[in-house]
Amino acid sequence: MALSETTKDRIKGCIYGQAIGDALGLGTEFMTRAEVKKYYPDGLKHYDQIIQDAHRSRWKQGSWTDDTDMMICIAKARHDNHFNLNEIACNFKEWFNGNPLGIGRHTFNVLCMRDYTKDPIKAAEIVWHMYQCRSAANGGLMRTSIVATSPIAEEDEIADICRLTHPDMRCVGSCVLIVKLMQSLIFADYQLGKAHLMEIANRYDDRIAEYLEMSFNDDPAVLSLDDDTMGYTLKTMAIALWSLWHCDSFNGGLLAVVNLGGDADTNAAVSCALLGAKYGFSSIPQYYVENLQNRQILEDIYKQTIADLENCPHKGKYYKRAT
Ligand SMILES: [Mg+2]
C-alpha cells in the first residue's frame, strides 16, 4: 500500500498524541477543576510543572501511564494490519504481572483471573457480571487509538479488542465510534459527521447518543468530567469529540482537556490521539515530543506500523471512504 506523507504524518500524530496526552494529563488526573486551578494557577502546560504528590511522583515527569502501556500491548500483536486477540491478551497479562502503575479497577479485576489468557473475553464477562453489569469504565477506550492505524480493522475487530477486558456495549460502542472517526481522518482525509456517528452509536447502546449530543455543547462543563463518575467511557468519548469539534490545533486541545481535571490522562490520551490523527505529528509542538520519556518505543511502533502498511497483502482492499 502506497502511503502519502500526509497519511504517515497523521499516523505518527495519532501514536504520539496518545502518549503526550497521557503524560501531561497525569498532572491533573483525579483533580476537580478547582484543584487544577489551585495547583496550576496559570494552567498546566509543561511536564516539569506536574506536582509531585503521592500519586504522581511514582512516574518521572513526561512519562505515559497504563493507557499507553496497554496501547503498546495491542501494537505488539499487529500482523498484516490485523491485531491478534490471543497475543494482545498475553501481552496484557505479561504487563499486569509486572505490577504496573495506574491500572483501573475493572481492568485489574479482569487481568487478575488465573485463566485470563485461555478465554479473555469470557473472563471479562464473568467480572462484568460479578459487578451487576454496571461497569462501563474507559479502560477499553483509553488504549484503542492504535487500532485506527490499520485501514482494514473492521468493527468486529475493534469491538473484540475492547471486549478483551470491557464487554459493556457502551465501552464497545465508544471504541468503535472513535476508531472509525480516526481511521477516516488518517486514511480518507474525511471527518465523519454527526449523523454517521449517531448511526454507529445507536447500533451499540442507546445511552451513547446523549453523550455524543453533549460533545457539541460549547461548554465542556456539561460533561461533569471531575465528579465521581469521571472514569465513565462515554465521558471520555464525549470530551475527545468535544476537542475535535471545538479546538483548532493539537496544542489547543491538549491544554484545554488537561486543564479540565477528572480522568485527565485518559481523556487527553484519547483526545490527543484524535487531534494527532487530524492535524498530524508535524503540528505537535516539539517540546512535548522531545521531553517525553521512552519516546524511542513510540518511534519503533511508528516504524513497524508503516512497514506493516507498506507490506500490506490486501493491496486491492484500500480504505473505503464512508459516505
Ligand atoms: Mg492512566
Image (cartoon, rainbow, N blue to C red):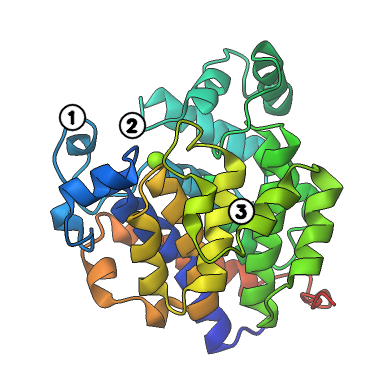
Residue 78's tag is 3
Please state which amino acid type lies under the numbered disc 2: Leu
Q: Considering the image in quadrants, where does the N terminus appear?
A: bottom right
Closest to the camera, between mark 2 and mark 3, is 2
**What amino acid is labelled 1 in the image?**
Ala
Distance from Cα at disc 2 to Cα at disc 1: 12 Å
Gap in angstroms between the C-alphas marked 1 and 3: 36 Å
Label 2 and label 3: CA atoms lie apart by: 24 Å
Q: At label 3, which amino acid type do we have?
A: Arg
Q: Secondary structure at mark 3?
A: strand
> Can see residue 80?
no
Left/right of residue 10 with respect to residue 191 in the rendered view: left
Q: Quadrant of ligand 1?
A: top left
In which quarter of the view is residue 257 placed?
bottom left
User: To which residue does mark 1 refer?
Assistant: 54
Q: Position of residue 236 (x, y in %)?
A: 54, 48
Task: Give the percent coordinates (x, y) of residue 242.
Answer: 55, 63
Which one is in front in this view, the residue at disc 2 or the one at disc 1? 1
Identified at 67% across, 66% down, the residue is 181
Circle 1 crowding by C-alpha within 10 Å: few under 14, some 14–19, many from 20: few
Secondary structure of residue under mark 2 = loop
- Please state which of the two labelled residues, at mark 1 or mark 3, is closer to the viewer: 1
Q: Residues within 10 Å of mark 2 (few under 14, many from 20)?
A: few
* In front of the other: 176 or 134: 134
Secondary-structure class at tag 1: loop
Name the residue that disc number 2 marks. Answer: 101
Q: Is residue 72 visible?
A: yes
Upstream in the sequence, badge 1 or badge 3? 1
